[in-house]
Image (spheres, helix red, strand yellow):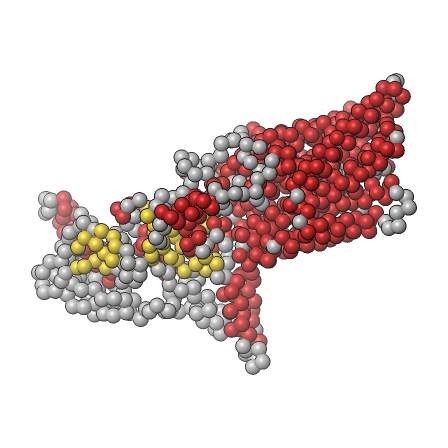
């Protein structure tokens, strides 16, 4: 089949893309004597018959002014055409033995392929603002192709100076807020250690005298989840917990599941802490003018106001509350042991409680099983540590997780055992202020008052833990989704956290037991997602560097433990599953609506155009407003760092961005190279092909002389005005000198 004639019509011949050719924007090789015109004009006439053309050593990109050196010589047919039939004949003759030389059966020469590519990519009527598609087959005839046309991309060189890299390194190594080990531990520690005030009645109701054993078992089972958290944190040291992990290792939908689970767990933390503090006050102060339910609402509102005032930033206050709580609990334990030794040396109460144990071994096993399921309520708070991982020193994180498990095991086991030894089971199950009653029995009114003050302070600290988790999550989501930026405001996030806590409390019937079961289900679901994130890390991102590597056996045991205990909690309190499911669905749909605004606007626009509203005079102008609104919600720029020119990799990256970042209108492929000869030959032609293949996305190509590193990403982010959270990288190998966490939010696609 012949190539293009001198009239400039498009050729139908399919050839390999030439090296370094800018086929759309006028990049061409100097071919003499044949002259190739710019897009939109006919090709000039070719040289005289028999005259040869030689490809010169460079081609210039007119868009970016970048030159790619070539050192190839080839002969172009004198007519400016390449005849496939003559080439096929020569190959057939060579196959029959007519041609002895190997060059007769070789592929088309460089100049021939380059000429063919130029001819094939000519566009007669193309201009700077022309569309990538001429005909749009749409069921809505009132909409043309212009409303979602994103524009044509370009190629350019990005000049990153040594000073830019130095400034970027300074910003990366600049002062960052880092908490000490005690302060970092106290944020989650207040919630973990404060669970002794609300876990005991539910656990004793399920397991009776075996409650201390169940609480100890639940604490020790966290040892299977500690390696998973360490592995995830070493790979992605970014605030946001499961939202960030699932976004890195999977995609948008699963990340929204993680965000909804994290948000619901944080809200349940605040709600249970506030409700328990109210119950303690109401039980101790009988002349309370308001009910415990109204007091819980007041606590949530008051803590929201304090958080707006900046109390949440006071790490020293959080640490002071945590230390005070540990001291009070130690004093309570010592006083209880002394009282037990001096006033009940024969352990009469303990023997009475032991006599109430289940009679058969099957009932005993059932009691212990359900007790362990509910006992996970006593270790809540452990899952909050990844939400503020950025302010924890990497060397402190393993010790913090270990210490939280130790604190949970000691406090829950020792205090629950002393309560069972000194208080009747009926008193423990029927009362909300169990430790206050224990303090009154062991030390008198002074210890009872001290325990009450400690309970209120540490439980309100748990409310702050939930608020901090919510703020960090919404802040990370605001960086990942540009039109959610309003929710990244600390004031909006704090109000959102307080409001959602009130909704959950009211939806649970203002019942502390129901809220506690919902909290337990939410906590176990959050822990389950940690195991899912670890599994996806191993399957989808096996090449990422992660020094603490968790084993398959540990992951399997973690899955079994969390699924079994989650089912156990649901069986014990089916209403908890109902409240959790409704709450989770509401939060998930709200987050999905925030992140899918372009798709929603597109659906609204189609519905409007297909309805009579588009034809009525009074509503005819709505289409223009809807299109402007759609474009305003889909105007983000996303950078994708690529290493090679494999078009299937570039296509997969583009499809991943289109699927997971719906507000992306421009995708910038960024390639860093050491020397001009290192630029992949097909990088620019493939970028141009993808630019034309995606009319709704502008595909640009940026090259820069540098080596991929964290400081280059930071400098490029500042130069292109694209935040690092809106940047992606195709993949990072295990021998990459920088860890993913050091890139500060960059997303891995493959």
Residue at far right of view? 287
Examine the rendering and report whether any part of residue 205 can be seen.
no
Give the total number of marks visible in the rendering.
0
Counting from the top left corner in percent of width and height, residue 193 is at: 72, 34
- Residue 579 lies left or right of residue 35; in this view the side is right
Q: Quadrant of the C terminus?
A: top left
Counting from the top left corner in percent of width and height, residue 26 is at: 27, 62
Residue drawn at 13 percent across, 58 percent down: 53
Q: Quadrant of the N terminus?
A: bottom left
Q: Which one is nearer the viewer's eye here, 121 or 431?
A: 431
Q: Which one is nearer the viewer's eye here, 605 or 201?
A: 201
Residue drawn at 27 percent across, 48 percent down: 676
Counting from the top left corner in percent of width and height, residue 654 is at: 42, 53
Q: Which one is nearer the viewer's eye here, 371 or 386?
A: 386
- Residue 89 lies left or right of residue 312; in this view the side is left
Q: Identify whether 73 is placed above or below 411.
A: below
Residue at far top of view? 346
- Residue 723 lies left or right of residue 227; in this view the side is left
Examine the rendering and report whether any part of residue 446 can be seen.
yes
Residue at far bottom of view? 617
Residue drawn at 82 percent across, 28 percent down: 419
Residue drawn at 18 percent across, 68 percent down: 44
Counting from the top left corner in percent of width and height, residue 685 is at: 31, 55
Q: Which one is nearer the viewer's eye here, 467 or 213?
A: 467
- Residue 22 lies left or right of residue 377; in this view the side is left
């Amino acid at each position: 089949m012949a190539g293009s004639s001198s009239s400039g019509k498009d050729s139908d011949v399919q050839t390999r893309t030439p090296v370094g050719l800018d086929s759309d924007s006028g990049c061409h090789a100097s071919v003499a004597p044949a002259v190739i015109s710019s897009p939109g004009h006919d090709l000039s006439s070719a040289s005289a018959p028999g005259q040869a053309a030689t490809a010169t050593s460079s081609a210039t990109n007119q868009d970016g002014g970048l030159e790619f050196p070539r050192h190839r010589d080839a002969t172009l047919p004198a007519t400016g055409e390449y005849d496939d039939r003559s080439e096929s004949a020569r190959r057939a003759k060579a196959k029959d033995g007519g041609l002895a030389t190997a060059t007769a059966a070789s592929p088309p020469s460089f100049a021939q392929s380059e000429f063919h590519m130029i001819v094939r990519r000519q566009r007669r009527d193309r201009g700077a603002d022309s569309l990538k598609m001429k005909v749009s087959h749409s069921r809505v005839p009132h909409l043309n192709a212009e409303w979602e046309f994103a524009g044509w991309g370009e190629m350019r060189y990005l000049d990153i100076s040594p000073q830019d890299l130095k400034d970027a390194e300074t910003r990366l190594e600049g002062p960052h807020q880092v908490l000490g080990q005690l302060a970092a531990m106290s944020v989650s520690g207040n919630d973990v250690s404060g669970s002794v005030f609300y876990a005991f009645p539910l656990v004793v109701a399920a397991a009776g005298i075996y409650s201390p054993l169940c609480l100890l078992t639940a604490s020790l089972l966290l040892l299977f989840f500690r390696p998973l958290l360490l592995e995830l944190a070493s790979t992605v040291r970014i605030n946001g917990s499961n939202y960030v992990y699932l976004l890195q290792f999977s995609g948008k939908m699963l990340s929204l599941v993680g965000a909804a689970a994290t948000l619901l767990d944080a809200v349940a933390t605040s709600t249970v802490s506030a409700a328990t503090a109210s119950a303690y006050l109401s039980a101790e102060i009988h002349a309370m003018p308001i009910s415990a339910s109204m007091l819980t609402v007041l606590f949530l509102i008051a803590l929201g106001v304090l958080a707006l005032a900046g109390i949440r930033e006071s790490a020293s206050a959080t640490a002071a509350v945590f230390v005070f709580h540990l001291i009070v609990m130690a004093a309570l334990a010592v006083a209880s042991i002394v009282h037990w030794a001096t006033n009940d040396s024969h352990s009469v109460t303990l023997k009475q409680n032991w006599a109430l144990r289940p009679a058969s071994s099957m009932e005993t096993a059932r009691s212990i099983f359900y007790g362990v399921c509910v006992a996970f309520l006593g270790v809540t708070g452990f899952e909050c540590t990844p939400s503020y991982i950025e302010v924890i020193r990497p060397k402190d994180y393993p010790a913090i997780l270990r210490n939280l498990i130790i604190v949970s095991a000691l406090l829950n086991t020792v205090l629950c055992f002393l309560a069972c030894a000194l208080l009747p089971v009926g008193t423990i199950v029927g009362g909300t202020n169990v430790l206050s009653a224990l303090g009154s029995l062991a030390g008198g009114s002074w210890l009872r008052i001290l325990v009450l003050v400690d309970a209120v302070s540490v439980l309100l600290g748990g409310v702050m833990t939930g608020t901090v988790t919510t703020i960090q999550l919404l802040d990370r989501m605001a960086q990942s989704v540009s039109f959610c930026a309003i929710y990244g405001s600390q004031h909006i996030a704090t109000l959102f956290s307080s409001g959602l806590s009130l909704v959950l409390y009211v939806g649970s019937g203002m019942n502390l037991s129901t809220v506690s079961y919902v909290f337990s289900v939410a906590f176990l679901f959050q822990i389950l997602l940690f195991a899912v994130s670890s599994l996806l890390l191993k399957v989808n991102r096996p090449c990422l560097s992660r020094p603490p590597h968790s084993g398959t056996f540990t992951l399997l045991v973690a899955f079994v433990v969390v699924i079994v205990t989650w089912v156990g909690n649901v069986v014990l309190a089916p209403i908890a599953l109902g409240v959790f499911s409704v709450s989770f669905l509401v939060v998930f749909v709200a987050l999905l609506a925030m992140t899918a605004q372009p798709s929603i606007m597109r659906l609204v626009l189609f519905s409007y155009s297909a309805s009579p509203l588009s034809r009525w005079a009074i509503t005819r102008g709505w289409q223009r407003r809807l299109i402007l609104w759609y474009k305003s919600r889909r105007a983000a720029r996303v950078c994708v760092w690529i290493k090679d020119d494999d078009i299937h990799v570039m296509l997969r990256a583009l499809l991943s961005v289109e699927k997971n970042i719906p507000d992306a209108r421009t995708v910038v492929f960024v390639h860093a190279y050491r020397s001009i000869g290192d630029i992949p030959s097909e990088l620019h032609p493939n970028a141009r092909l993808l630019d034309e293949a995606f009319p709704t996305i502008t595909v640009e190509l940026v090259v820069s002389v540098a080596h991929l590193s964290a400081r280059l990403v930071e400098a490029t982010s500042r130069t292109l005005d694209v935040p690092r959270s809106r940047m992606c990288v195709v993949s990072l190998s295990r021998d990459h000198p920088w860890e993913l966490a050091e890139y500060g939010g960059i997303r891995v696609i493959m």
